[in-house]
Image: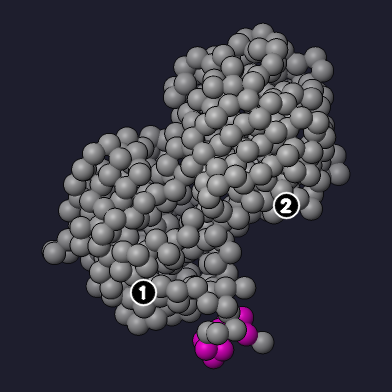
Amino acid sequence: MDVMRIEGGNTLSGSISVSGAKNAALPIFAATLLTEETCVLENVPNLSDIRFMAEILEHLGAEVEQTGPTTWKITAKDISHRAPYDLVRKMRASVCLMGPLAGRLKKAEISLPGGCVIGPRPIDMHIKGFTGLGMKVDVDKGYVFLDAEHACGNPIFLGGRHGSTVTGTANVLMAAVLTPGKTIIECAACEPEVVDLCRMLVSMGADIDGIGSPTLTIQGVDRLTGCKYSILPDRIEAGTFLIAGAMAGENLTVTNLRVADQAALIDKLKEAGVPLTIDSESSITVSKSSVPLIPVDVVTHPHPGFPTDVQAQMSTLMSVTPGISIVTEKIFPNRFMHVPELQRMGADIAIEGPNAIVKGQQKLSGAPVMASDLRASAALILAGLVAEGTTWVLRIYHLDRGYDKIDDKLRAVGAVIERLPEKDMPQDLNPEAA
Ligand code: EPU
């Protein structure tokens, strides 16, 4: 296993480019199962989650080939309807296979993915959606069994306690495009990744109205064709780099992003006093302020609200912003695994229910810290960039699930960061050493 070593206190400047979006690419890979024709996907990020998804598609019988650094070709001619636990457990997003398999094969058997450190992640709304489409749904021995033989279009409401559901919307949408009749999804997720999936499906011949709105109207079609589709830029990776610029940047330009997808973060960064210039629709330049930032309160919401996937990184920024800020997590109320690790670096953060009360310090100090999930890992990398001394981030396989070569990208703009085998870190600093 590798660890990341970061020497804090270096300035980031130059240009850093954003890769394709993981959370768009994963359901889009699953959507290739909806046709027996070939789909060519471009701007695919280089991530372990993508490789897991490719492995699962291959297991299901698809021909999957990476034809270039960011291009994949997938042909799902003869496919099976069953995704077993040993594959699915590696990645939660494999729930997205249910919709396409039920849509195309009229049946699916998918293992439930199991626990998740960011809190309970039920799939009751996915099941409600499938049932609403007239499918017979059984959950037995850790598997979900879908029988879509008599499925037909219907109105379906997909709102829950925490708002809409991103992969739930994707799942019902992918089933509905090949289900006879008209499906209306109310309270559909409006995240850019869902919009991207809709666009990909339309390029395959799907009939979808209301794309980007909370009401999606889908008229089922008999078959879909292959497509060539380029995945949108990753707004969470972009947000992470913008925050890195706010913490340590001197004219750090984040390119290949979509400014329109960053509205909530830009608003908060400006409120905090971060010097930020929108250069174009796809580029933002950000610097560390020469005067202390102003603490800001942040509440996560479904899109276009402040994204939960940037909450941990924003908490790191606030932990070095003198004063008190409150970060409230409304989507996954337990998503604070980064906090105990940031505390080890000197951050003063108290958790009260879904709120993190952050008392900003002038500085953090480098320490060995443990990554626990993807965004928590990113928060620790950001902390390491500004901490005094050396930070060692362990269990970085979490980071590799969702950040495409983050160490290379940060090093190219001035960070001192390197990936090492765990055995090369001083063993007296390694909490996992025997
Ligand atoms: N929820 C239910 N029942 C359901 C589905 C969701 O109660 O059937 C609840 C969840 O527990 C949560 C809220 O609804 O409280 C929203 O969950 P959602 O279904 O939208 O999340 P998701 O689809 O499982 C995706 C992303 C997450 C991201 C969330 C929220 C993918 C593969 N994952 O998860 O990304 O945090 O939407 O935007 O798209 C990440 O990339 O690090 C990550 C966790």
Disc 2 on helix, strand or loop?
A: loop
* Residue 428 part of the magenta-drawn span: yes
Give the quarter of the figure containing the C terminus: bottom right
Q: Which residue is mark 2?
A: 89
Seen at 39% across and 49% down, the residue is: 18
User: Which one is closest to the eye, mark 2 or mark 1?
Assistant: 1
- In the figure, is residue 319 to the left or right of 422? left
Q: Earlier in the sequence, mark 2 or mark 1?
A: 2
- Specify the label residue 416 is tagged with: 1
Disc 1 on helix, strand or loop?
A: strand
Which quadrant would residue 118 be assigned to in this image? bottom right
* Residue 61 part of the magenta-drawn span: no
User: Closest to the observer: 411 or 190?
Assistant: 411
Which quadrant would residue 127 be assigned to in this image? top right
Mark 1 crowdedness (10 Å alpha carbons): few <14, some 14-19, many ≥20: many
Seen at 32% across and 35% down, the residue is: 260
Q: Residue furthest left?
A: 291
Seen at 52% across and 89% down, the residue is: 426
Seen at 56% across and 89% down, the residue is: 427
The magenta stretch is 426-433
Q: Amino acid at mark 1?
A: Val
Report if residue 291 is visible in the image.
yes
Q: Position of residue 104 (x, y in %)?
A: 74, 24
Report if residue 360 is visible in the image.
no
Marker count (numbered):
2
Q: Position of residue 169 (x, y in %)?
A: 58, 29
Q: Amino acid at mark 2?
A: Arg
Q: Residue furthest bottom?
A: 428
Q: Position of residue 418 (x, y in %)?
A: 45, 74
